[in-house]
Amino acid sequence: MLDYIKKSDTVAVSRECFDAALSVDCGQSFRWKSVLENEVCGVAFGKTLNFIQDEEKVTFLNVTEEDFLKIWVPYFDLDRDYSAICNRLETDYYLKKAVTECPGIRILRQDSWEALCSFIISQNNNIPRIKGIIERLCATLGDPIDSREFSFPSAEKIAAAGIEALAPLRAGFRAKYIIDAAEKVASGEINLQKIALAPLDEGRDELIKIKGVGEKVAQCALLYGFGKVDAFPVDVWVKRIMADLYPDGLPECTNGVRGIAQQYLFHWYRMNSK
């Protein structure tokens, strides 16, 4: 059971196997930003959240206990035993280095439509530009949450708006892929709830029916938006990791949690390459 401390309008969670700042800043989500030296703010599921963290705890600010339990515990995957997972991964030489040097990464459980659309936008793109396109998409078609933030627009709203409405996003060739995804999801041709319940390979096969969605985007969506922690997205960095460290494939200790292992390896390898 998750231990937390509720005080007034804050909730504090131990930093054991949990680095919220790193989790939102390692390529999983694109709606988080630093606002102060140790404060981060972001948007998910139509809610805004600010948090601060020190060496001992992560403190969620201005949050009700109900929202913490219903939204932020699942979002940060706080109901999964990462201590046990990391103990398994540490039986491998390189994964032990990754887990030890980059502790606390968790796989974010994002809204499935937002994750799918975000990783369509991410293709052949860099992080600042991805964030800019998503910010403009939300400001153009999302609903206002407060004076500065907007919700992520639904597939139905994007499909109804049409491709002309996406011109202000400056998304380039990705605009037609966003519209195709929105139309297929809005019509029910692609059923996101069924994908969430389906085996990994079946979910992938459904997602790649969308124009512009290949293996990598499908695996990213499944990992970060459908809770499929055995999904294994392969980008340029992961290709290098596999070629340099695991030419014969990932070790047995990653079975069932390859996506979690990938996230640790991805961040650790990039950090050491720099």
Image (cartoon, rainbow, N blue to C red):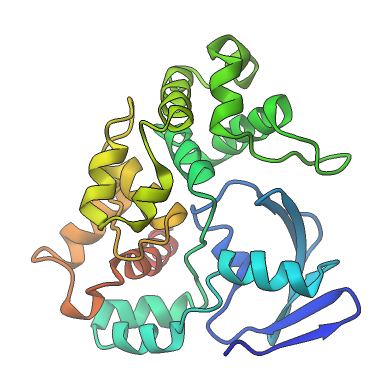
- Can residue 170 be seen in this snapshot? no
Q: State whether residue 58 is above or below residue 43.
A: below
The percent position of residue 237, horizontal first and vertical second, equals: 32, 52
Q: Nearer the viewer, residue 115 or 17?
A: 115
The percent position of residue 101, horizontal first and vertical second, equals: 45, 78
**Would you say 251 lies left or right of 121 here?**
left
Q: Which of the 4 quarters of the picture holds residue 96?
A: bottom left
Q: Which of the 4 quarters of the picture holds residue 128?
A: top right
Q: Which of the 4 quarters of the picture holds residue 18?
A: bottom right
Q: How many marks?
A: 0
The percent position of residue 17, horizontal first and vertical second, equals: 53, 83
Q: State whether residue 146 is above or below residue 143.
A: below
- Residue at 56%, 28% (x, y): give it: 156
- Residue at 27%, 35% (x, y): give it: 208
- Residue at 75%, 39% (x, y): give it: 150
The percent position of residue 198, horizontal first and vertical second, equals: 29, 55
Q: State whether residue 266 is above or below residue 136.
A: below
- Residue at 71%, 53% (x, y): give it: 42
